[in-house]
Image: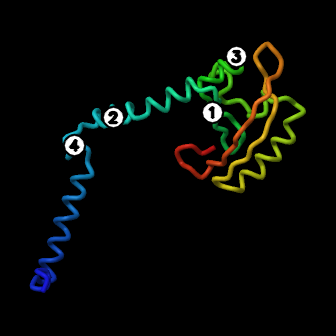
Amino acid sequence: MNNNDNKTKGQLLKEIEDLKAKIAKLEKPEASGLSVRKVEDILYESEQPFRYLAKNSNDLFVIIDIDGKVTYVSDSIERITGFVPAEVLGLSSFQLMHPDDVDHLSQILSELVTLPGEMVQDEFRFQKKGEGWIHLEAMVTNYLHEPSIKG
């Protein structure tokens, strides 16, 4: 026989309320002995390896929103294209692509928008600052459904 079998409905409801209060208290960072500042520091430190990889990678990471505007670009863009991130942020994703590649890539992106989580591989020419065009291979994934990315 379970101990709860001898308890009244009122006693069980009281225990449930007590447990809910304990859970709510534990969900606060201070309850674990961590200040909000400490939690922010831990989060910052956990992000550093990814920031380092994005900055020093031979790959270029770009996020394009539903309107086709660049909302994020990794620092590696400067090494690859000569543009600093601030020069590219807010531009149309097609603005620095070779004009002959725009229609093809526009078609691919239009199809990909309807396929959350899907990935497409393609190649296109991208402007190299002051030097003409470079060929890039792209792995394009639809993360519009992901709130932290939206691109």
Disc 4 crowd rating (10 Å Cα; few below 14, some 14-19, many 20+) is: few
Q: Which residue is mark 3?
A: 82
Quarter of the image where one finds residue 45: top left
Q: Which mark is residue 61?
A: 1
Q: Earlier in the sequence, mark 2 or mark 3?
A: 2
The residues bearing labels 3 and 1 have C-alpha atoms spaced at a distance of: 15 Å
Q: Which residue is mark 4?
A: 30
The image position of residue 11, as x and y in percent, is 12, 77
Figure colour scheme: rainbow
Disc 1 crowd rating (10 Å Cα; few below 14, some 14-19, many 20+) is: some
Residue drawn at x 16%, y 65% is 18
Query: Would you say 17 lies left or right of 51 here?
Result: left
33 or 14, nearer to the observer: 33
Q: Earlier in the sequence, mark 4 or mark 1?
A: 4
Against 30, is 27 above or below?
A: below
Residue drawn at x 60%, y 52% is 145
